[in-house]
C-alpha cells in the first residue's frame, strides 16, 4: 500500500523543502500556520509554505492548534520549520520526520543555523529524525554534513540545508530506518533574543563577523557606528583600502533606522 505523505511547514526553509520534495514525490496535503497580519497595513499574509503549496496545487490545512480534534489523513508527515511543537496525540497518529538543519545532537532547538555560525563552526548539515516528545532528540534516519565557508551567511546555509534535506528524504522514504541519537555532544540553539543582535566593537573582529553572518539576511545585527544606530547586514575583515571600518571590520551593507538597506558608500554619501 502506498504511504500517504504530508508536509508540515510554515517558514521559508520549510517552503523550500516542500517545493523540492513535491518535485519528486506526491504530497497529499500541507499543514501550516494560519495567515497572520503583517506589514504596515496589517493585511493577512499567508505563510511562505502556503504560497508554494497553492502554486503547486497542494491542498492546505491551517488549524489554529494541532490538538486531538485535528485528524490528519497521512501515514508520514515531514516536519520542516512548522513553528509549533507537535503534541503527543498527533505523534501517535502518524510517523513524523523532522528536518533539522544541524548535525544533531549538536544545536538542538530553535536557531541551529544561526548558533552554528555564531560559534564559528567549521561545518554543519542536515539531520532527518523521528519527532518525539523530547526536543530534537529522536532517532536518526539520515544525516549529512557540508563545510561552512567565510562567504556563508544564514541565508546561504538555509538554502544548502533545504536542498540537502530533500535529497536525504527522497533516499529514505517511504520506509526509513532509525539509529538512536547519541547524547554526547548535545547542545542547544536557543532562539535569537534582542541582546543576541548587538555587536560589541571591543570584541575580536571574527566574533562580530560571525554574528553578522548568522543574522543575515533575515534578522540583522545592530551596532553604533559613528554615533548612529545601524543594522549591519554585511561585513568583512578590514583592509588597507576599506572605506567604513568599525572594530576591525569593513562594513559593506548597512541600514539606518527607518530606512532601507544600502551599500556603505551610499550611506557615507548621505552623511554629507
Image: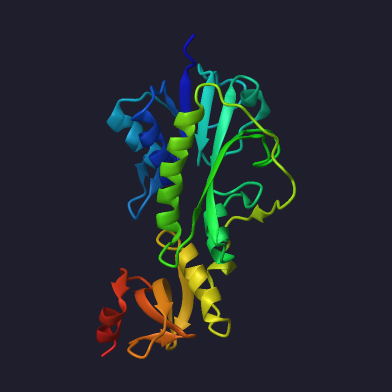
Looking at the picture, does residue 179 appear above or below residue 256?
Answer: above
For the image, the number of numbered tags is 0
Specify how the rendered protein is coloured.
rainbow
Question: Does 137 sit left or right of 113 as displayed?
Answer: right
Looking at the picture, does residue 226 appear above or below residue 140?
Answer: below
Give the image location of residue 123, x and y in percent: 54, 57
Within the image, what quadrant is residue 170 found in?
Answer: top left
- The answer to which of 257 and 155 lies nearer the viewer is 155
- The answer to which of 2 and 243 lies nearer the viewer is 2
Question: Does 130 sit left or right of 172 as displayed?
Answer: right
Give the image location of residue 192, x and y in percent: 56, 59
Write the residue at 59% across / 24% down: 95
Write the residue at 57% across / 26% down: 176
Can residue 246 be seen here? yes
Can residue 63 be seen here? no
Q: Quadrant of the C terminus?
A: bottom left
Give the image location of residue 11, x and y in percent: 44, 44
- The answer to which of 202 and 83 lies nearer the viewer is 202
Amino acid at each position: 500500500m502506498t504511504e500517504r505523505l504530508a508536509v508540515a511547514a510554515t517558514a521559508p526553509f520549510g517552503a523550500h523543502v516542500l517545493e523540492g520534495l513535491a518535485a519528486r514525490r506526491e504530497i497529499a496535503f500541507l499543514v501550516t500556520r494560519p495567515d497572520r497580519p503583517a506589514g504596515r497595513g496589517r493585511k493577512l499574509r499567508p505563510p511562505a509554505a502556503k504560497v508554494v503549496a497553492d502554486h503547486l496545487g497542494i491542498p492546505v490545512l491551517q488549524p489554529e492548534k494541532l490538538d486531538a480534534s485535528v485528524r490528519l489523513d497521512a501515514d508520514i508527515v515531514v516536519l520542516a520549520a512548522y513553528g509549533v511543537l507537535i503534541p503527543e496525540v498527533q505523534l501517535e497518529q502518524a510517523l513524523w520526520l523532522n528536518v533539522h538543519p544541524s548535525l544533531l545532537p549538536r544545536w538542538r532547538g530553535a536557531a541551529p543555523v544561526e548558533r552554528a555560525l555564531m560559534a564559528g563552526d567549521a561545518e554543519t548539515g542536515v539531520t532527518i529524525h523521528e519527532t518525539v516528545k523530547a526536543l530534537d532528540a529522536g532517532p536518526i534516519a539520515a544525516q549529512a554534513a557540508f563545510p561552512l565557508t567565510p562567504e556563508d551567511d544564514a541565508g546561504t546555509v538555509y538554502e544548502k540545508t533545504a536542498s540537502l534535506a530533500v535529497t536525504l528524504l527522497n533516499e529514505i522514504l517511504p520506509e526509513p530506518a532509525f539509529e538512536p541519537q547519541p547524547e554526547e555532544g548535545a547542545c542547544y540553539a536557543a532562539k535569537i533574543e534582542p541582546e543576541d543582535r548587538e555587536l560589541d566593537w571591543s570584541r575580536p573582529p571574527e566574533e562580530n563577523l560571525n554574528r553578522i553572518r548568522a543574522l543575515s539576511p533575515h534578522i540583522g545585527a545592530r551596532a553604533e557606528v559613528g554615533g548612529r544606530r545601524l543594522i549591519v547586514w554585511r561585513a568583512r575583515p578590514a583592509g588597507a583600502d576599506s572605506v567604513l571600518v568599525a572594530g576591525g571590520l569593513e562594513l559593506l551593507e548597512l541600514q539606518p533606522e527607518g530606512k532601507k538597506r544600502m551599500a556603505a558608500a551610499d550611506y557615507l554619501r548621505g552623511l554629507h
